[in-house]
Image (cartoon, coloured by chain):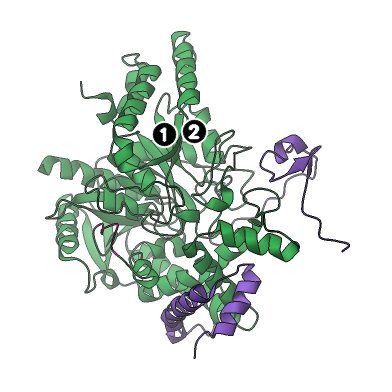
Chain colours: A purple, B green
Amino acid sequence: MGLTRDDILNLAKLSRLRFNENEIEGFQSDLNSIMDYIDVLNEVDTEDVEPLVHINNNDIDLREDKIEKSLTSKEAMVNAPQSEDGALVVPKMIGE
Amino acid sequence: MNKIYELTALEIRDKILSRELTAEEVVLDIFKRIDETDSQIGSFVYLRKEKALKEAKNIDKRLAEGEKVGALVGIPVAIKDNMVSIDDPSQSASKILKGYVGIYDATVVNKLKEADAIIIGKTNMDEFAMGSTTTTSKYDIITRNPWDLDRVPGGSSGGGATAIASKQCFLSLGSDTGGSIRQPAAFCGVVGLKPTYGRVSRYGLMAFGSSLDQIGPFGKTVGDVALALNIISGEDKYDATVSKKAVPNYLECLTGDIKGMKIGVPKEYFIDGINSEVNKKTKEALDIFKELGAEIVEISLPHTKYAAPTYYVLAPAEASSNLARYDGVRYGHRSENVSDIDSLYINSRTEGFGNEVKRRIMIGTYVLSAGFYDAYFKKAQKVRRLIKEDFNQAFKKVDIIFTPVTPNTAFKIDDKKTPLELYLEDIFTIPANLAGIPGISLPAGMSKDGLPIGIQLLGRPFGEEDILRAGDCFEKAMKERI
């Protein structure tokens, strides 16, 4: 049992990552060891247990829906790989 | 007087306030210290020399004019490379954020600045905070344990711990998701605190595990850590997970008295396989707490052995979600090899992320994927509730809980450990992140081969006062023994 090579390729696709053959084998082995280790959780009886999602029971306070200052487009583009006139430039990928 | 860099944060602050020292000479001394030591230690990935000096001079000017100043006035502070600050580079030690410059200040950075602290630079870390050695940093910098340069400082906040241990600054901020402040604190012989989840804002901290991450201070003493916690804690409109609970003055809780305090010792943390030197120092530390008048109570945290597996489902899951934003579009590395949308994402991410990060993204994607979500992710969330419940029950009987921090002392940088072996080093620190409770690592002496050993105190939610008070008493008792 465990993760097959196809499983690893599928996960890579979902994660938007690509691996070479060596790496695929390496990941398969690493992930299988880790998943074997994680399997011990099946020993725990969680029949009537609710998942813990919120650590503290904070009441979520919504703020007033009013417009506040935010980033300028100049600031937002500071780290853009490519930008022009305050807009992000991306490779063309529609309309081929 | 001691050399400037040997003083504590509180002493520096007092000497600047009394004008015995100027902020400028403190900052210059610190940068000189860094110049002399950092090529060996490798704490820093970025230094804010000019800005720090300018800020220091401005502080001196304001003091001369009798102006009111903040509680951290003139104290040189370092922050981890995963916390953003305006106009400073922050990369989370990853190639995927090479060249990224902060366009806003993290809330903790803003609070430090408002308290007139001087941020001197950014410290090295494991890539995206995933690791316990700082060796997965993608900078060309090896961070070394100041006690033995061939050994790791721990991680992921390694640079934050070494900066304090080698006296390169007086306070530093790290982040702790599964032990990343407490473990390097133990390996480097300094104090490190992970606050209660929701005590400190995560706004401006590059997210790894959003339900686990907390920013916390490193310091030379418990007093310094309490001082830092005063400043960085509190309500924040930019982080909905931060508590609105008032922040006490953590310095005032250092009363020097823990007579009658109930300290729980969980039997599940005292297992075979812990290094004998760690065992020895842990026992000696417990004896000190007895001598200080605390009452030692045996307790059980029955789900302890499930904490690490639970963490290694939840943390990678949250990470895979949080790291989806690194896609080569708006910031960070964009591949030159792009022909369509898939290759934009796949190539940018494949080129930009290191192996450990990829491993965790893959695990996270797996446990969240259709068909496995219930069996793994939801299951782990249920076990998490049981782990938290163990602590809730324990804190009905005791005030704080005493445990080791790590099963071993710092290992060699060249030691080849498997991913799983590394994950098992975190077994004593992980539970506090799962339960959202505060934990402090305190220096508890040295091993025979000169390596620091730490002990951990865990508190109930928002119970930092108890662990700081006990930690401070322990620290004073340790000083008297030398």
Would you call the spot at circle 1 few (<14 residues within 10 Å), some (14-19), or many (20 or more)? many
The residue segment tinted magenta is B409-415
* Residue at 52% from the left image edge and 44% from the top image edge: B83
- Residue A68: x, y in percent? 76, 38
Q: Is residue B454 magenta?
A: no
The answer to whether marks 2 and 1 mark residues whose Cβ atoms lie closer than 8 Å is yes
Q: How many marks?
A: 2
Hey, what amino acid is under mark 2?
Leu
Q: Observer-nearest residue: B27 or B60? A: B27
* Residue at 62% from the left image edge and 69% from the top image edge: A15
Give the SS element for disc 2: helix
Using the image, name the chain to which the residue with label 2 belongs: B
Q: Is residue B302 above or below residue B44?
A: below
Would you call the spot at circle 2 few (<14 residues within 10 Å), some (14-19), or many (20 or more)? many
Image-based side of B333 in relation to B31, left or right: right
Which residue is identified by label 1?
Answer: B77
Q: Observer-nearest residue: B49 or B180? A: B49
Distance from Cα at disc 2 to Cα at disc 1: 8 Å
Using the image, name the chain to which the residue with label 1 belongs: B
Q: Main secondary structure of the magenta part?
A: loop
- Residue B313: x, y in percent? 50, 72
- Are discs 2 and 1 both within one chain? yes
Which residue is identified by label 2?
Answer: B112
* Residue farthest top in this picture: B65
- Residue B194: x, y in percent? 41, 51
